[in-house]
Image: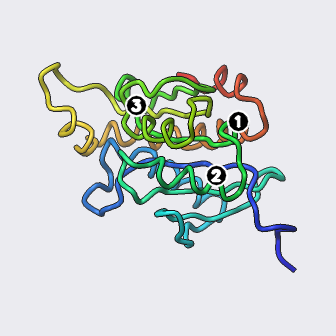
Amino acid sequence: MSLFSHTGADWIIAGLGNPEPKYDGTRHNAGFAALDALAQRWGCPLGKAKWQGLYGITQVDGRKVMLLKPLTYMNLSGQCIAPAAQFYKIPRSHVLVLCDDITQEPGHLRIRASGSAGGHNGLKSIIASLGGEDFPRLRIGVGAKPRPDYDLAAWVLGRFPPADAQALADRRDDIEGACRLILAGKLGEAQNRYNH
């Protein structure tokens, strides 16, 4: 008998990034890295392909959760996430997005219940595709550009120096803890505990 009574999901956790190997370890792929860490911890391989993405479904604290990695490239992330949410009839409020944030220091986390894209093209695509901005997001600090005239694309597609990469790796327990609280409907507690 299957682990699941039905094949649906109650939540989607989507990690944002760009799919080609050349983007591995870049600032823009902080969401992919966070999702991969959750998949490993929760024993949920992202082995199924659908909606232009890779996914797996697992149980987390009694809830069925789809871990979803859009392969559409960052700027079209919503074209993967919205069809998956529609297929399983998952409301926007149960779509948790993990993404990079250049306004935060490396490793800092910022959890929000909703909000604008704040210049993030992946979030912009998701807001457009889901038809609203009232979905939770966990933004992972990757550090700001070193100077104002520095090319933004070059910055977000650049790789972390070792200290910054370690700062992100050091927050993996916190990211998991925050996700568990958000899934349990305790987003405010997640903010109080992990927004730093």
Secondary structure beneath disc 2?
helix
Alpha carbons under labels 2 and 1: distance apart: 17 Å
Report the residue at 84% width, 53% height from top. Answer: 62
x and y percent of residue 34 in the render? 50, 48
How far is the residue under mark 3 from the one under mark 1? 19 Å
Quick one: label 2, few (<14), some, or many (20+) residues within 10 Å? many
**Residue 80 % position (x, y):** 50, 55
The amino acid type, in three-letter code, at marker 2 is Ala
The residue lying toward the viewer, choosing from 140 and 50, is 50
Q: How would you rate the neighbour count of disc 3 (Cα within 10 Å): few for under 14, some for 14-19, many for 20 or more?
A: many
Which of marks 1 and 3 precedes in the sequence? Answer: 3
Q: Position of residue 89 (x, y in %)?
A: 72, 52
Q: Is residue 43 left or right of residue 118?
A: right
Residue 101 badge: 3
Q: Could you tell me which secondary element the residue under label 1 belongs to?
A: helix
**Label 1 is placed on what type of residue?**
Ile
Residue 51, position in %: x, y? Answer: 52, 63
Q: Dot 1 corresponds to which residue? A: 182
Q: Quadrant of residue 46?
A: bottom right
Residue 155 sits in quarter: top left
Picture layout, residue 40 above or below residue 166:
below
In this rendering, position of residue 127 left or right of residue 30: right
Q: Are marks 2 and 1 in contact (CB under 8 Å)?
A: no
> Of the residues tagged 2 and 1, which is closer to the observer?
2
Name the kind of residue labelled 3 in the image. Answer: Asp
As measured in the structure, the alpha-carbon distance from the residue carrying label 3 to the one carrying label 2 is 24 Å
Tell me, for residue 126, which label it has, or none.
Answer: none
Instruction: From the image, tell me which residue sits under label 2.
Output: 85
Q: Between 36 and 107, which is closer to the camera in this rendering?
A: 36
Badge 1 crowding class, 10 Å Cα cut-off, few under 14, some 14 to 19, many 20 or more, is many
Residue found 56% across the figure and 56% down from its top: 68
From the image, which quarter does the N terminus lie in?
bottom right
